[in-house]
Amino acid sequence: MKLTLEVLKRRIDVAAKRTPADLVIKNGKVINVFTREILQEDIAIVDGYIAGLGSYEGKQTIDAAGNYIVPGFIDGHVHIESAMVTPAEFSNVVLPHGVTTVIADPHEIANVSGLAGIDFMLKASEDIPLDVFIMLPSCVPATPFENAGAELSSTDLEDLYAHPRVIGLGEVMDYPAVMQNHEGMLKKLKGASSKAKYIDGHAAGLNADGINVYMSAGIRTDHECINAEEALVRIRRGMHVMLREGSAARDLIALLKAVNEQNARRCLFVTDDKHLDDLMNEGSIDHNVRMAINEGVDPMLAIQMATLNAAECFGLKHKGAIAPGYEADLLFLSDLNTVNIDRVMKNGKLAAEGGAIKHPAKTNMAPAPSIIDSVKINSLNFEDLKIDIGEGNANMIGIIPNSIVTKHLVEKPDSLNGYFQPNPVKDYLKLAVLERHKNTGNLGLGIIKGLGISSGAIASTVAHDSHNIVAAATSDEDLLVAINHTAKIKGGLAVVQDGIVLADLALPIAGLMTDRDSAFIYDRLSELNQALRKIGCSMLFNPFLTLSFLALPVIPELKLTDKGLFSVKTFHHISVAEQTLH
């Protein structure tokens, strides 16, 4: 609600007990995240805001019946597109898990559709129960070593900063551009800083010297730490460290080793990229809180990290606490240790109960035609798929289960007449990344080890961050079928075996999302998982999630783009057959 003189007067009158509150919550155990103590006080609410704590009367009363009352959880860094649903459906999924606010970076759809994609996400997140704040994508494309569907300059972003829900510049992942003072990057950093906006980092693999560079550039967060040592370096330099537990990147347990009473206020929880089925099965930030508690973190501290810390990191002055003048985003927990959420209130109104949304939001706009028509590829033939490796060793990508980091392996795979031959027994598969935005015909080919497919192929248009078609296969025949099918369905996921499509999920919105509801998508994901098992996947980790990060050339050590095999250590493309830099 817009703050007018009348609204302000009403809030003060309720606080002063001159007029009754709209709603009073009684008999709750109120979690005070400022002091980390439990208070037995009424909560007086008017116009969706908390007016007072103490003893109050209201037009309506809710008996909390001894429930713990905690602030709504905040996801400090998320890509809604990774859940494959629109913002409205995302809201329906995460609100029952206690997430009332998210800081979203739409760089996935921006890398496909540019400004039209950002505009879609802004408009599609209007008038939904979930509060969605936007960090503008800083790296479209993510690096100059791949081809994305768009390119955004500081000038392109300039006018968007005026939007009331745009609060900053999203994860800066092009470290060389920052380090070497590239003019385009400097203009983006200056554009955000000059408007007092926040700047998110993406400091994968950076040491203390690299963090010095990022902090000097005005970058204040990082969600890419993978161990306690990296987290401590960033905290000591003044960064906020985001403790991530997503679907592919599960770093929370390792990072909690860095958290203590002295530095916890610099830590917050994020999901970053989390698939819909994981959100529905595990939860969102509530899952992070639960994991932290299970690892020995005091429940009050874990809740503080999920609420106040995130709010203060992004200057959300009316969020993250139960206090006068704060929004009445409240969770009713029957148990503090298990974070069992009975009810969720958003702006003082019941939003979810018993794990179910009360009033489902609906997608309120159709994407532009250019967003729907985003897959454009040339036809491929078997000759295009050959990888010349000679008779010697080859550079190949080594999969690390449940991590987006890979290993740079140098091994001798099978070959025939000098060309690579997949060998499922040794877990050597062919990997392809095909440019799909402008029909350039660019095709990168490589070898991966550790994906765990014994037959067939998988393909997807979800390939961070440029979102070209990425596919892995045990045969060229199935590789072609999988690639062509993802194009036929205007983007999405597909599993193929012996030339037959076993399962798919169409994602026609930029090749990343669908406007179908979560129940439909969940069922299709279940079918895909069944198909994955049929082609031999152990499902100890999700192959599609792993596949989606194999084309991201800002995460160590070796990745594949539409321009070829890429060494993140040297920031150069390299040959599959040799280690000579191009």
Image (cartoon, rainbow, N blue to C red):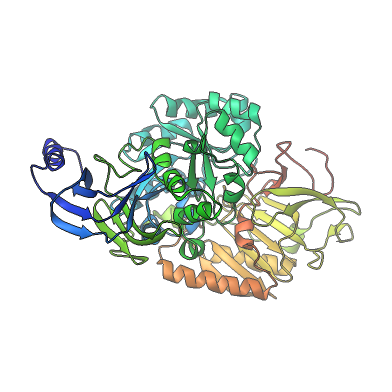
Q: Position of residue 547 (x, y in %)?
A: 64, 57
Name the foreground residue: 455 vs 263.
263
Location of the C terminus by quadrant is: top right
Q: Work out whether residue 161 can be spotted.
A: yes
Please name the residue shown 59% across and 25% down the image. 213
Q: Position of residue 171 (x, y in %)?
A: 52, 39
Location of the N terminus by quadrant is: top left
Name the foreground residue: 256 vs 30.
30
Vertical arrangement, residue 460 with respect to residue 133, above or below: below
Left or right for 381, reference 392: left
Q: Position of residue 263 (x, y in %)?
A: 52, 35
Name the foreground residue: 149 vs 354.
354
- Furthest residue to the right? 391
- Furthest residue to the left? 18
Among the 4 quarters of the image, the one containing residue 28: bottom left
Q: Work out whether residue 75 can be spotted.
A: no
Looking at the rendered structure, the number of numbered marks drawn on it comes to: 0
Q: Position of residue 69 (x, y in %)?
A: 32, 53
Vertical arrangement, residue 324 with respect to residue 358, above or below: above
